[in-house]
Amino acid sequence: MALSMLLGDRVANGVHLLFLAEPDVNGTRATIVAPQALLHPGVPQPHGEWIHALLTRHPDRRDGALVFFSDLTEELDDAGMSWPQLHIDWIGVLEALDQLNAAGEVGAFHLHDVSSGADTLLASGSRTTIEWITPAGERAEPDEGARERLREKIAADLAADLAANGPL
């Protein structure tokens, strides 16, 4: 099955992509970019173009959505597809975005010092069972709405930054 079969005709406006970047000197960080960053000539193509299409043209995508990279992976899985099956170098794309941002060629919003619990929620799909060990040595799971509450908080922080500083 080709990725094009998963795409709709409508393009969602104002969406942003959140992905986890390699830890830097400030600790683990999540990076948020606008879709046009995926089309930058420094991003491996056509890989960036395909991720851009999935980000902006998925039939369920809402205008203004904050999309975790793990959401894209889950959407592919829902359609019986995977990044390797489609030969999309998603790692190369995300590494290029991170390097382009460090060089000042692509704008981004960063979340520094992301806790390990938040890090896990960002990296995992909604169907992933998450469990960790508390300091008391007990097993714990996030409640059902934790991932969406985290998304809402990050989206609010991003909206405030965009209002103050303009688009990425």
Image (cartoon, rainbow, N blue to C red):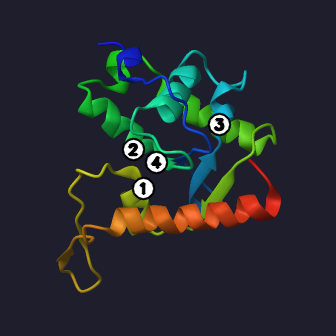
SS state under label 3: helix
Residue beneath disc 3: 97
Residue density around tag 4, few if under 14, some if 14–19, many if 20 or more, within 10 Å: many
Contact, mark 2 vs mark 4 (Cβ under 8 Å) = yes
Nearer the observer: mark 4 or 1; the answer is 4
Q: Nearer the viewer, residue 162 or 37?
A: 162
Residue beneath disc 4: 68
Spot occupied by residue 28 in the image (x, y as percentages of width and height): 54, 59
Per the rendering, the mark at residue 56 is: none
SS state under label 1: helix
Residue beneath disc 1: 122
Q: Which residue sits furthest bottom?
A: 136
SS state under label 2: helix
Residue beneath disc 2: 70
Q: Earlier in the sequence, mark 4 or mark 1?
A: 4
Spot occupied by residue 11 in the image (x, y as percentages of width and height): 55, 31
Spot occupied by residue 74 in the image (x, y as percentages of width and height): 32, 39
Residue located 80% across and 37% down the image: 105
Spot occupied by residue 141 in the image (x, y as percentages of width and height): 22, 70
Residue type at mark 3: give it: Leu
Residue density around tag 1, few if under 14, some if 14–19, many if 20 or more, within 10 Å: many
